[in-house]
Amino acid sequence: MSGNRVRLQAIRDVEAYVPPSASFTDTEAPGQIFGENVFNKVVMQKRLPKSVYKSVIATIEHGAKLDPLVGDAVASAMKDWALEKGVTHYAHVFYPLTGLTAEKHDSFLEPVSDGSALAEFAGKTLTQGEPDASSFPNGGLRNTFEARGYTAWDPTSPAYVLENPNGNTLCIPTVFVSMTGEALDHKTPLLRSQQAMGEHAERILKLFGHTDPEHVVSFCGPEQEYFLVDRHFFLARPDLLNAGRTLFGAKPPKGQEFDDHYFGAIPERVLGFMMDTERELFKLGIPAKTRHNEVAPGQFEIAPMFERANLAADHQQLLMTTFKTIAKKHGMECLFHEKPFQGVNGSGKHVNFSLGNSEVGSVFVPGDTPHENAQFLVFCAAVIRAVHLYAGLLRASVASATNDHRLGANEAPPAIISIFLGDQLADVFGQIAKGAATSSKGKGTMIIGVDTLPVLPTDPGDRNRTSPFAFTGNRFEFRAPGSMQSVAGPMTTINTIMAESLDYMATILEKALADGEDFDTAVQLLLTEIITEHGDVVFNGDGYADAWPIEAEKRGLANLKTTLDALPELITEPAMALFEKYKVFNHREMHSRYEIGLEQYALTIGVEARLTLEVGATSILPASVRYQTELATNVAALKAAGVEGDPDALAEVSGPIAELRAGLATLKAALDEETDHGALAEAEHARDALLPAMLTVRAAADTLEAIVADDLWPLPTYQEMLFML
Ligand code: ADP
Ligand code: MG
């Protein structure tokens, strides 16, 4: 089918589509199926010998090193459990640096000498795999003549069964490393950073009287925003299909947001999808409650309950895969792109994080006693210091070509990394800056100390939607991560910079104690020092205001607008020293991340540029020219009949057509240009030549969309995609 007929057929198909009903029925209680497909602690306790169970739990709960001897026993129990669930294959699941999820599938069946096959699954098969993975990005860490990457079982993230009409698969979460042990994935550094953060957080807890604190871990609750569009439209948009975002499309005319014809149908269909996703997520042990409260039409949000960061990261990836699959089942496509529709709200992934253990809960909850409050303030000060010192790294952890469309735009957090504390906490730190906090705003709190620190109200009070890093009562919320990225990168950065700050503070306080100084005074002095030196990163105002970038510059806060401004932060001396010191990344690994960041950036924009050229030249230009011809024919025919036509209309379409042609020529020239000078040059070329040329093409095309006869227009419009669900 050609151009406009694809679109018109899609509209008819959408109108005729009858979505399936959800499979989550009234009679099925969510509790019945929760974790049904997970090889979790309950299953392990039932199926593993006691000593093996204990050993695995010691690794999961307390970060103990995995005893290599338990592998066989766990593998065997896992296999039996999986076979009972109709599993035929197993897969090592890992998270390569493309940001996607990769799986290496193998059959349980292994041929034996008599020609038959046996279901085999040995310990070594569980604990280590060797995917044929030479095509995953490694930023120079793994030359093809070197050995391949290896996957290694991560026992802290439970194995699960993924159901599929063509056979069920046992999925084993793994890390992905080179033969020399260098990280090729997002999970390895996350686990390393947890370790570092935990160690130093425990030192702080000890100083506050927890003599033998439980292992401190970081928790993460990612709020995920996404769009749903009807699949008929999705398939009729090569840009959405291949780049995940619309490279063309005029904004829908105002006032038509609430088209009555479609309004009633929206909740039902999306609700069916939501119920189905919930059911699937429950089976996989992902505690998620969907909701539909987003600003843009067609946009929704889901927030799974917070979990340990590495588990949350795995679950988050699994959630995205599940959403994609279930959306298809309901005739829709789920879009995780940060900016699928220009001029319409974008999607983020808010990373809520806290540190803690089952003993103290979140260290970001002010306790009931001043003593606990002092501990709370120390942890908060650590965050303030960490974010101020390493704002560039936080910015780099969310840098991507796709997130560039969102950060700094009007409805997303600005690219300037600052902290919002809320009035009460800001007030307390304001007083600490002056020497000592003696009172706390609102809620009639008392004046006491460790001995001079106030009791703090637990109510977070106010919210600030414009801040990239906000205190929200019992946690911090990092709002800059993009909707399609893994939370592992941001969490790795947060853990590492927290490890450094906690280390710094613990060292000072331990020394004070060893020197026989008064602990309360030492805490007080340290807090004052930190808020004095790093208080500039605290900003409670409107992050969208024009005055903020100017003010931020005065404060010396960086405004790293694009990915190419942010990525060099990864390879500064202080950054590399930091990650090396806490054994999260060595120099080579940092350089590899930087290189991969550049490659991915150039790759993303390269694909978009080629798509822009293709769609522009083969769909939009022909449709526009047809309309131009129609008008010209009309003018000529009328003239022949002695009637005055409308030459203005012809000129109106001819102008943008000329611009479109010129834009396409420039874009083609930019694409044809030789740029084989390494990753940085390619990325710069993408930013400086491809992106501007794409914008020129788009501007002309979007103008034409408003002029060309609707029945000729080839691409589903914003109006159709956003409001026909
Ligand atoms: P809000 O509407 O205030 O943003 P939500 O209920 O949407 O709150 O919660 C946002 C996310 O924050 C959820 O994923 C939730 O599990 C998570 N969260 C709540 N408490 C914590 C915590 N202590 N540490 C980490 N994440 C948390
Ligand atoms: Mg929130």
Image: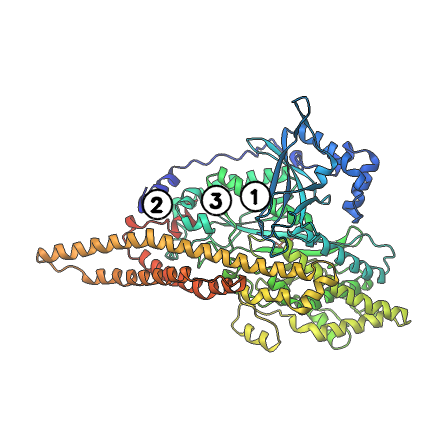
Q: Secondary structure at mark 2?
A: helix
Q: Which colour assignment does the render follow? A: rainbow
**Disc 3 marks which amino acid?**
Glu
Front: mark 3 or 1 = 1
- State which tag comes first along the sequence, 3 or 1: 1
Q: Secondary structure at mark 3?
A: strand
C-alpha span from label 3 to label 1: 12 Å
Total count of labels: 3
Give the residue at mark 2: 7
Instruction: Look at 58% across and 64% down and name the residue there.
Output: 567
Ligand 1 within 8 Å of disc 3? The answer is no
User: Do callouts 3 and 1 mark residues in contact (Cβ within 8 Å)?
Assistant: no
Give the residue at mark 3: 333
Measuring from the top left, give residue 111's x and y in whole percent.
Answer: 66, 27
Badge number at residue 5: none
- State which tag comes first along the sequence, 2 or 3: 2
Instruction: Look at 79% across and 63% down and name the residue there.
Output: 375
User: Do callouts 1 and 2 mark residues in contact (Cβ within 8 Å)?
Assistant: no
Q: Which quarter shows the C terminus?
A: top left
C-alpha span from label 2 to label 3: 16 Å
**Disc 2 marks which amino acid?**
Arg
Instruction: Look at 37% across and 60% down and name the residue there.
Output: 697
C-alpha span from label 1 to label 2: 27 Å
Q: Is residue 224 left or right of residue 176?
A: left
Asked whether the viewer can see residue 455, the reply is: no
Q: Viewer-proximal residue, 502 or 590?
A: 590
Q: In the displayed structure, would residue 405 be above or below residue 136?
A: below
Few, some or many C-alpha atoms within 10 Å of disc 1 (few <14, some 14-19, many ≥20)? some
**Disc 1 marks which amino acid?**
Thr
Measuring from the top left, give residue 132's x and y in whole percent.
Answer: 60, 43
Few, some or many C-alpha atoms within 10 Å of disc 3 (few <14, some 14-19, many ≥20)? many
Give the residue at mark 1: 321
